[in-house]
Amino acid sequence: MDLLPEELLHFIVKSLAYRPSPPESEFPEFQLKYPSLELKSLSLVNKKLRRICIPLLFAYLYINDSEEKLRVLADSSGPHLEFLRMLELGAAVYEAQDISALNDLLPQTKRLSVVKFGSWTALAECLSTIHKSNPSITILVGRANDLIDG
């Protein structure tokens, strides 16, 4: 594996990195990429593959509930934020401490291009911060029947 050229390893990893979007995808026009389950395992093979996999592992972050969100945000000063391209928030992320943590996180994510909200409440509370930190971020909101307004 160490003898393979870096470019070839990048190509191999990228071809395995993402699950195909389901045909019934909510937002087919955005062709959102979700990391494959194998990507984490592949990143543990050796240091070279780890270096290639890390940006892909942290490009997409899905946070479903408050506990997980707070844990991720506790480490928000880590280098993984530079790789974050898409942040998806589940409908359970809408409490005041979640919104506060999210408002602290957003200005640190320089490459973030898409935020998908599962709650209208969270979107309303974060809109100003998104506009100030990166007005070009694409904002998506889940299906109306999936949303919980707190």
Image (cartoon, rainbow, N blue to C red):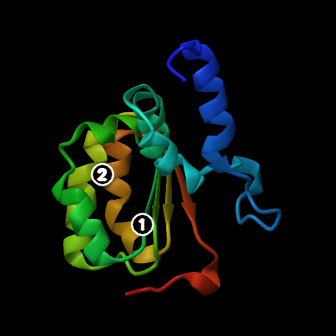
* Residue closest to the far right: 23
**Residue drawn at x 25%, y 71% as measured from the top left:** 98
Tag 1: residue type? Leu
Q: CA distance from mark 2 to mark 1?
A: 10 Å
Q: Position of residue 124 (x, y in %)?
A: 39, 68
User: The N terminus lies in which quarter of the figure?
Assistant: top right
Q: Which mark is residue 123?
A: 1
**Residue drawn at x 55%, y 13% as measured from the top left:** 3
* First-in-chain label (2 vs 1): 1
- Disc 2 crowd rating (10 Å Cα; few below 14, some 14-19, many 20+) is some
The residue nearer to you, when weighing 133 against 64, is 64
Q: Position of residue 47 (x, y in %)?
A: 37, 29
User: The C terminus lies in which quarter of the figure?
Assistant: bottom left
Tag 2: residue type? Thr
Q: In this picture, is 13 found above or below 129? A: above
Q: Which mark is residue 129?
A: 2
Indicate the secondary structure of the residue bearing disc 1. Answer: helix
Confirm whether residue 59 shows in the render: no
- Name the side, left or right, on which 144 lies relative to 23: left
